[in-house]
Amino acid sequence: MRIEMASEPGDAGRPNEDHTSVALPASGDGGALVVLDGVTPPDDDGCAHGVPWFTSRLGGALLELAASRRDLTLASCLSEAITRTSEAHRSTCDLSHPRTPQATVVAARWDEDVVEHLVLSDSVLLLEGVDGTVTPLLDTRLDRLPESVRSLAAEARALPRGSAERAAAGAVYARAVEALRNSPCGDGFHTAAADPDVARLAVTGTTPRADVGALLGLTDGASRWVETFRLGGWPELLELVRKEGPYALVARVREAESADPDGTAFPRGKAHDDATTVYVELPRPQLASDAR
């Protein structure tokens, strides 16, 4: 089995808020991977610990549960991991704060029969079939915000770059998006924060193990290669990682970011973002004929 990971902060002066980890149980009959992208709060989040602490806690709990509790679905594992993490700082932090630490989530788990997946918010899981077909497993709700909100972004981009008017319009758009985060209305999108019930809203599914050759988890700082800079499609991204490794993908993203530092050609929320990827090439399942 081949496993490779890369994670790099967008700003060397700030801690990396991403998390990735992989577990291979001692039984040898499968494994699990987890990728989290912490949401950077624009101001106080009511937590004494911060986003990196949260993503490490949540990611560690989710990986442990996904690897050891095969009787639970991945959604149930995420729900329990959120509960554990919340209990770890409920007595010291304001978990009711709208910007309490939170994260996007990608998780996958495999055994000799199936590959399970879970995606919550805008991180990405790519599944490569044994025939070479690459399927992106996505939670697209953030891309389907109401027209009234998307028009605010267009209005902000139309204003002169660097102007006070553009900054003010951008702030209005940001507040409108934040109002839809974990909102009970049907137009919102969801991240893992303090409410374990959000796990039931994740995109989940299963694929026969015999049909899967590799998995690639990406935070949106790494998936910019496709989604922002349009340097290729999902199959080309996975092939880049397979041939040159995860850090090669991060390096290509950094080159594209540096070539457009102000976001003029490729508008984005941050000039440079934390970028994380984990690649798992699954071994070929042993067939009955192989064992003879």
Image (cartoon, rainbow, N blue to C red):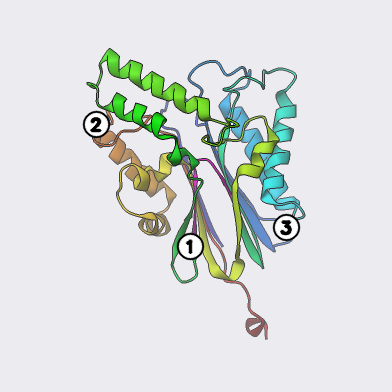
| Amino acid at pointer 1 | Glu
Q: Position of residue 177 (x, y in %)?
A: 46, 28
Q: Choose between 246 and 273: the one closer to the eye.
A: 273
Q: Locate the N terminus and report the quarter of the image it occupies.
A: bottom right
Quarter of the view holding residue 256: top left
Asked if the residue at tag 2 contacts the one at tag 3, i.e. Cβ–Cβ closer than 8 Å, the answer is no
Q: Position of residue 120 (x, y in %)?
A: 56, 42
Q: Position of residue 22 (x, y in %)?
A: 61, 49
| Amino acid at pointer 2 | Thr
Q: Secondary structure at mark 1?
A: strand
CA separation in Å, label 1 and label 2: 34 Å
Q: Is residue 283 left or right of residue 69?
A: left
What label sits on residue 33 in the rendered view? none
Question: Which of pointers 1 and 2 lies earlier in the amino acid sequence?
Answer: 1
In reply to whether residue 216 is colored magenta, the answer given is no
For label 3, the residue is 26
> Is residue 34 shown above or below 89?
below
Q: Residue at x 48, y 20 (%)?
A: 42
Q: Position of residue 271 (x, y in %)?
A: 34, 30
For label 1, the residue is 128
Asked if the residue at tag 2 contacts the one at tag 1, i.e. Cβ–Cβ closer than 8 Å, the answer is no
Question: Which of pointers 3 and 2 lies earlier in the amino acid sequence?
Answer: 3
For label 2, the residue is 264
Q: Choose between 148 and 283: the one closer to the eye.
A: 148
Q: Which residues are magenta?
A: 117-127
Q: Residues within 10 Å of mark 1 (few under 14, many from 20)?
A: many
Q: Residues within 10 Å of mark 3 (few under 14, many from 20)?
A: few
Whether residue 119 can be seen here: yes
| Amino acid at pointer 3 | Ala
Q: Secondary structure at mark 2?
A: loop
